[in-house]
Image (cartoon, helix red, strand yellow):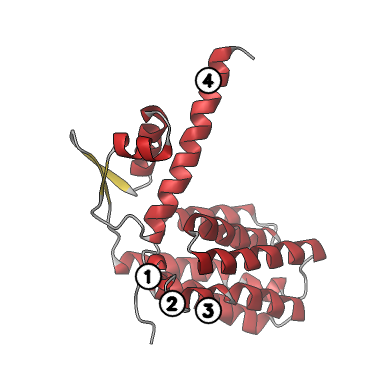
Amino acid sequence: MSPEPMRLLEVQSLREQVERTLSSRIVAGEFAPGTVLTVPTLAAEFGVSATPVREAMLNLARRGFLSPIRNRGFRVTEISLDELKELGEVRALLEAPPMRRLAGNLPDATVARLDELAAEIVAAGREGRFEDYLEADTAFHLTLLEVTGNRHLVRLVSELRQQTRLVGLVNLAESDALVASSLEHAELVRLLVAGDGVAAEALMQRHVGHVAGLWSGQDEA
């Protein structure tokens, strides 16, 4: 391979890494809405050139996470509680009903993978590793839905997750609430393995409800 294509691949890889880390920090609330981010500052923090950082931030702007500020950088956009509720409602409609069909029908290899991801979600939440937490959480939900064989369902849920903010995660990590909600993943696997589709559907409904509740800093009581 010629040097130029290799260089393009390196830049793209760096851009993807920066974008993934930045989006995780925005979703988790480490960068609060209204925070102004600049390319030079982030490039220095990541130890990379300005190019992948600028490209990552432009991508995040297209995704609605950032808005450009002329000659200043990018501002972290806000998302209203109503928007979060709507996102949560749509996700619940898509993710909860399939639990009845999946109950008692999970392959052993999938159960093992889900158990592994559930444990990582709890550990990452307890340790405040928000990027790892969000990646494991996404992998858990999409791995579960892939068993349905419905690619459109998996794609839609993946896209909805990319629009979601969970700005309460940072504060929750300082209490037991994040770990408690994280343990719901292991409980969901247990219910599915036991064939209890009704309880699994109810748990998924409640779990996704945290989007506009606990995970966004709202009191669910």
Q: Nearer the viewer, residue 113 or 30?
A: 30
The Cα–Cα distance between marks 2 and 4, rounded to whole angstroms, is 44 Å
Quadrant of res 105: bottom right
- The residue drawn where x is 28% and y is 52% is 77
Identify the element where label 2 is drawn: loop
Residue, disc 3: 180
- Disc 2 or disc 4, which is closer to the eye? 2
194 lies left or right of 204: right
Furthest residue to the right?
108
Q: Is residue 16 above or below residue 89?
A: above
What's the amino acid at mark 1? Asn
Q: Where residue 61 sits: x, y (%)?
A: 33, 42
The Cα–Cα distance between marks 2 and 1, rounded to whole angstroms, is 7 Å
The answer to whether marks 2 and 1 mark residues whose Cβ atoms lie closer than 8 Å is yes
Furthest residue to the top?
2
The Cα–Cα distance between marks 1 and 3, rounded to whole angstroms, is 14 Å
74 lies left or right of 3: left
Could you classify mark 2 by the number of other residues whose Cα lies within 10 Å: few (under 14), some (14-19), or many (20 or more)?
A: few
What's the amino acid at mark 3? Ala
Q: Where residue 111 sits: x, y (%)?
A: 75, 67
Residue, disc 4: 7
- Tell me which label, 4 or 1, sits earlier in the chain: 4
- Tell me which label, 1 or 3, sits earlier in the chain: 1
Tell me the number on the disc at residue 171: 1
- The residue drawn where x is 48% and y is 73% is 178
Residue, disc 2: 175
Identify the element where label 3 is drawn: helix
Q: Is residue 157 visible?
A: no
- The residue drawn where x is 69% and y is 80% is 191
Quadrant of res 164: bottom left
What's the amino acid at mark 2? Ser
